[in-house]
Amino acid sequence: MNDDIPTGRKNAFADRYGSVFGRQQGLMLKMAGLASSECSASGPWIEDSAGARWLDFGSFGVHLLGHGHPQVAQALTAQAARMGLSSKILANEPIVAAAERLLALGGEPLDGIILANTGSEAVEAALKLARIATGRRRILAFRHAYHGRTPGALSVSHGYERHGALLTDGQSSFIEVGDLRAVEAALATGAYAAVIIEPVQGEGGIRPVTTAFLQALRELTRAHGVRFVLDEIQTGLGRTGQLVCPVAPDIRLLGKVLGGGMFPVAAALFDSAQFGAAARDPVVHASSFAGSPMAGAVVNAVLDVVTEPSFAPRVARLGERCRELIAERVGRHPTVAQVRGEGFMIGVEFKDMGDAGQMIIEAAKRKLLIAFCLTAPNVVRVYPPAVIDEPTLMDGIERFCASVAALPSRDPLPSKEPLANA
Ligand code: PLP
């Protein structure tokens, strides 16, 4: 660990950050011990301007391939030297090849694709396709869901009604995951265009959804002529230990890992038979930047890596080991409520939000980068990159457990008996 850089200099950087991005944000960086500037990165490691090395177990799900993956970097730089963004008039080979491969990965009956630059944009495309194809307006989502920050995506993200969501006038509704009866009652109204769900709810607190529930949603949506959207932007391409969810949707969304940690790319793969004229409209969703040769080159390199036969099974195996280790080491710590997740998508739920916040600070002291879930800030996520070697992975888990152990115990004598006169 390198703590040589004077605190004053670190704080000056955080102050500059705060002056352009918000004072509160600058203060938070300082308080959390995260006031240094990241400047280079390789694999699971980030180096800051003072030369300190941070182990990156955070990155909001983007860096499953770590930083600077050599195959992705090579593809990106070689393509950049040839051609960067598209003319949008001529088509390009890298993106066509990438689209063909993504559709093969997405599985039957997906045969159409919209490329986007961010996950939120892919969500917007999915909502738009479903509304145009069905002529209906409402979207059914779930409690603890998160689908992005653009206004349409916010409208199907639980708890964001006052953050600029567009469909607030009763056009989106949120049902508890598992409550099939409520789903059926809603769909029977004939008002819904789509149901959207994540196979593991990420920002809502790392909550795995059972395959049986997803399959039941598939059947119910089909029975009611409603489009079924699986948002695999955070879970897809190996994060959970499998490349895609085994249930066949009408639209499958991918993002985050798709960019290989280097280039923003997302995609909506769809079953054109379900979307009529909207599916045939080449500009139903369009973007100046999306579908570029650069994006194509990156996606092809990412697919080369994640479709290696050992890639996803290794994440599944090591993820289970990490989850078990964390549960064994700190699962009974008085601040911890539960350890859960799939693959390298692990969540540790703290009983108190303050402890989760303190955890980020303790981890920063140990040069481990972790983050909490956006809408469940009492849940801290452990997201190692898949490219990590086992000793470094265990080193990170050790730093994580040591950080939990360093938390002050708020409730040293847990009692099941209610306190008299409390
Ligand atoms: N959908 C899910 C499940 C996500 O987790 C996220 C981001 O965290 C998004 C959509 C939005 O993606 P982006 O941040 O690339 O817009």
Image (spheres, rainbow, N blue to C red):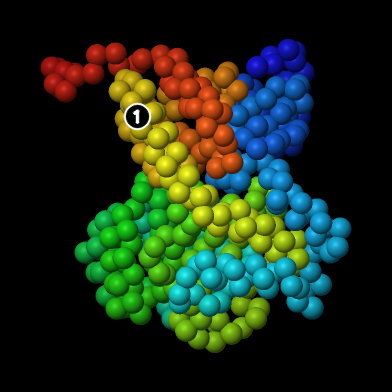
**Amino acid carrying mark 1 in the image:** Ala
**With respect to residue 347, does 164 lie above or below?**
below
150 sits to left or right of 67: left
Percent x, y of residue 10: 73, 20
Q: Is any atom of residue 388 visible in this view?
A: yes
Look at mark 1 in the image and give the residue it sits on: 327
**With respect to residue 328, does 67 lie above or below?**
below
167 sits to left or right of 260: left
Residue neighbourhood size for the residue with mark 1, other residues' Cα within 10 Å, grouped as few (<14), some (14–19), many (≥20): some
Circle 1 SS class = helix
Residue at 53% x, 37% y: name it: 384
Percent x, y of residue 203: 46, 45
Task: Give the quarter of the image for residue 224.
Answer: bottom left
Percent x, y of residue 154: 50, 56
Task: Give the quarter of the image for residue 29.
Answer: top right
Percent x, y of residue 34: 63, 25
Residue at 71% x, 29% y: name it: 47
